[in-house]
Structure formats: C-alpha cells, structure tokens
Amino acid sequence: MNAVRRLGCFFSILGLSLICRAALTGEQPQLSPFTAEYSLSRGDFTFAKVEIALTIDRRGVYRYSADTTPIGLTAVLHRDQISEISNGVITNEGVVPQSYHYRHRNSDSPRSVDIKFDWPAMRVTNSLDGTSWSMKIQPGTQDKFSQQLSLMHAVAAGNRTVEFPVADGGRAKDYSFSFQVEEVVDVEAGSFQSLKMARSKNRRASQASLWLAPKLNYLPVIVEKKERDGLYLMKLKRFAWTEPSTPDQ
C-alpha cells in the first residue's frame, strides 16, 4: 500500500512530535523528554498510529525515536513497520545530531538507512541498504529527524522564521519554516491555540504545515502534508512528559 510505505518519509520530513519547554527568562529554551501518540489519516480513513519518545539524560545526550504501525483493516492487509531513531547531544547552542537510523520492515521492498556525523571533519556518511558514501556538511546541519528538535527549540526562543540544512539522501537540502497564522485547532487530546508554520524544502512552494501549541510548550498537535494521492494528516491523541534518563541509559 503506497500510503503505508510512505509513512517513514512523511513522518521524518514533517516531524510532528517535538516538545520544547520555553524558558520564561533570558536563558536558552530547553528540550524536555516526553512520549506521545498520533493518528495518521488520509481523508476520512485513519490507517496508522505513530508512537514517539524523546529521552534526554542530564548531560544533554538525547535519543529521539518513532514507531509507525498500521491499524484497523490496514493492519490486516499490511504488516509494514517503520522505525526512526536520531541520537545526539543538546548543547547551549542547539541540537547536535550524531547518528540517524531508519528501518522499513515487513514490506515487499525493505529499506535500511544509516547516517553518521563526523563533526571534526565536517562530513556525514550515508549508508543505504549496504552502500555507503560521504558528503560535506555545514555547521548546524540536522538529520531528517533531529531537524524538528532544532525547529521547536528555535520557535520556543521566539523565532518565527527558521532555516537549516538537512542531511537527506545524497546531498544536503535546505529546509525553512515560516509562521503563517495563529488559530485554535481541535484534536483528540484537546482544543489548543496554535501557531501554524509552513514548511518549504529547497525554496519550493510549501506542501506541508505544522500547528504548534504554546500551551503545550510548542508541541505539534497537527501536521498536514499534501501528496498526489490526497491530503495526509497526523493528529495528537495523547502525550505525557517524562523524567530525564540516567547517563548510562
């Protein structure tokens, strides 16, 4: 099913699950660990759930993970499972990714992607289904998942236009997010005043939007993506803050 096989790309591009606690003082905003669940639908048909988690230890080392699985009739017909993990460190300057892992299992064409950052050399190594290559990167480069940690960190700090390069495939791509409007949105988790942000890649017209709720410390409550076969929506069902992990976890 094309919809299920697109889940991982859809989720990592839009990244709908990052929570950032904005400081009320002049200090830098701090990311906080959490768990959350979203529904994924196309039109009136909900076909998958996305379970995400951000863990951070007291040194700033983070692990950001997502598991996407079909539900309902889709689960009967398809056994696809998609997982993504970004590992790195959160510093005073921002998010510094160290590695990214993507797995698409139980499909007719399984896919495996691994990315490793070498910051002293300013390079990143991409491995796709056993084939590897290296490319140069710029300061502040993110992976397809950590980009959202950087986005939420920046919005919590008061920025309404955010740009950074993302190591995505064989070359870096320029991602930009811009504020559109403030409005109230309703999801299963509640009704929230939200900031609508439009996402653009490589200066092209935006095909994706995120609604961030200040009341939830800028948790995305809705993510919308236009595809050729329809409009995809991810909506927040539930979430919970968690405690920092210990350094050896």
Image (tube, rainbow, N blue to C red):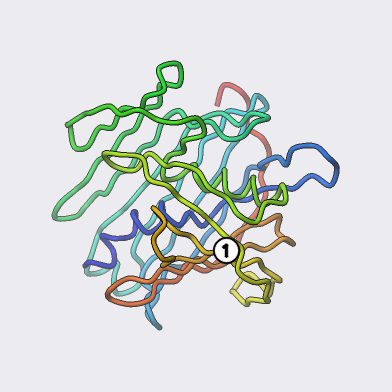
Left or right, 234 with reference to 229? right
| Quadrant of the image containing the N terminus | bottom left
Q: Position of residue 3 (x, y in %)?
A: 28, 67
Left or right, 245 with reference to 225? right
> Circle 1 sits on which residue?
197
Q: Residue at x 57, y 35 (%)?
A: 95
Q: Residue at x 38, y 66 (%)?
A: 48
Q: Position of residue 41 (x, y in %)?
A: 40, 73
Q: Position of residue 17 (x, y in %)?
A: 54, 54
Q: Position of residue 208 (x, y in %)?
A: 45, 65
243 up-or-down from 79: above or below: above
Relative to the observer, which residue lies in front, 132 or 2? Answer: 132
Relative to the observer, which residue lies in front, 140 or 114? Answer: 140
Image quadrant assignment for residue 185? bottom right
Q: Residue at x 21, y 52 (%)?
A: 106
Q: Residue at x 64, y 28 (%)?
A: 91
Residue 215 visible at all: yes
